[in-house]
Amino acid sequence: MELPFICIVSLTLLLSISTSSHAQIAKAPALSPTPAPAPAPDFVNLRVLLSVAGPFHTFLSYLESTKVIDTFQDQANNTEEGITLFVPKDSAFASQKKPSLSNLTDDQLKSLCLFHALPHYYTLSDFKNLSNMSPVSTFAGGEYTVNFTDITGTAHLSSGWTDTKVSSSVHATDPVAVYQIDKVLLPEAIFGTDIPPTPAPAPAPDISPAADSPSGVSETGFSSTASKPSSSPKLSSSWSHLVLAASSGMLVVLL
Ligand SMILES: *[C@@H]1O[C@H](CO)[C@@H](O)[C@H](O)[C@H]1NC(C)=O
Ligand SMILES: *[C@@H]1O[C@H](CO)[C@@H](O)[C@H](O)[C@H]1NC(C)=O
Ligand SMILES: *[C@@H]1O[C@H](CO)[C@@H](O)[C@H](O)[C@H]1NC(C)=O
Ligand SMILES: *[C@@H]1O[C@H](CO)[C@@H](O)[C@H](O)[C@H]1NC(C)=O
C-alpha cells in the first residue's frame, strides 16, 4: 500500500520538477531575443534629453514657458542645418544675481533662450573655426551675437556680460549638439553695454581643460581617436592641450 503511494508522490514530484525546469528552459529563449543593436532614433527629443542630463531643469523650464523648445525641436527635426545648444546648469541660474532675470519681459526671456543656440550643428572642433568668425549670430538673430575664443583648446563664449567655457558635451550627433556651459549667457541687446567691471580679473586660463567633469557625465563615450597623435614623442604642450580638449569634448552621454 505504501509503495504505490510513494511512487505516485515521487512521480508527481519528478513531473512537477521536470515541467517547471522545462518551462524555464522554454521560457528562457523568449526572454533573450532582445533586438541586438537598438536602432538609433531618427530624431532627438530635446525635452527628454534636457530633463535627464544636467541638471538643466531651470533652462528647460524657460524653454517650455517661452515655447522656444518647439522652435528648437522644429529646427532639430526639420532642417539640414541642425542646431547647437549651449545649456547652463541649474547652478548657473542660481548664481545669476547681478542683472536679475526676474524682471525680463516675455519677449526678452524668449530672446535670452534663443541666444543660447546657434541655427547650425557644430562639433567641438568647429568652435576653433568659429573663433575666427566672431561675432557669431545666434538663433536670436540681429545684434544677439556671441564671440568664440579658443583658449588652449577649450572653447570660450563671450557675450560682453558673460565669459564662459564649454565645460562638457552632452550630445553631439548631427543634427543636434548640446554643450554644457558654466554661466548664463547675457546678451548686450537686453542688458545694455553698461557692463560693470568684473570684481576680480578673469582667472588664468584653465591648465586642465578636462578637469571639471560634472556629475552624470559618463566617460564611457571616450573615443580612441584622441590617442592617435601620440606617435610623435615631441608632443608640444599646446598639442597635448588640444588633444586633452578634444578628448574631453568626446564625453558624450549616450542616451
Ligand atoms: C519632431 O519629431 C518627432 C518624431 O517624429 C515628433 O514626434 C515631434 O512632434 C516633432 N516635433 C516638431 C516640433 O517637429
Ligand atoms: C526689477 O524691477 C523692480 C521693480 O519693478 C526694480 O525696483 C528693480 O530695480 C528691477 N531690477 C532690475 C535688475 O532691473
Ligand atoms: C572655417 O572658417 C572659414 C573662414 O575662416 C570658412 O571659410 C570655412 O567654411 C569654415 N569651415 C567650416 C567647416 O565651418
Ligand atoms: C566680439 O568680437 C568683435 C570682433 O573681434 C569685437 O569687436 C567685439 O567687441 C567682441 N565682443 C565681445 C562681447 O567680446
Image (spheres, helix red, strand yellow):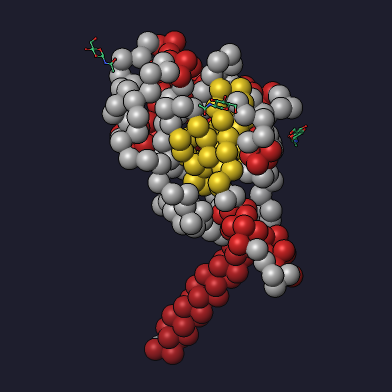
Q: Nearer the viewer, residue 237 or 61?
A: 237
Q: Quadrant of residue 199?
A: top left
Q: Nearer the viewer, residue 245 or 152?
A: 152
Q: Nearer the viewer, residue 21 or 30?
A: 30
Quarter of the figure with the N terminus: bottom left
Rendered residue at 44%/80% (across/down): 9
Rendered residue at 45%/35% (across/down): 163
Instruction: Indicate whether 25 appears above or below 36.
Output: below
Q: Quadrant of residue 237?
A: bottom right
Q: Nearer the viewer, residue 161 or 222?
A: 161
Q: Residue 144: percent from the left, percent from the top?
A: 54, 19
42 relative to 99 in the view: left or right: right
Rendered residue at 67%/34% (across/down): 132
Residue 43 appears in the rendering? no
224 relative to 194 in the view: left or right: right
Q: Quadrant of residue 29?
A: bottom right
Q: Residue 201: percent from the left, percent from the top?
A: 37, 40
Instruction: Indicate whether 128 appears above or below 185.
Output: below
Q: Residue 194: percent from the left, percent from the top?
A: 38, 18
Residue 102 appears in the rendering? yes
Q: Residue 41: percent from the left, percent from the top?
A: 66, 39
Rendered residue at 40%/41% (across/down): 202
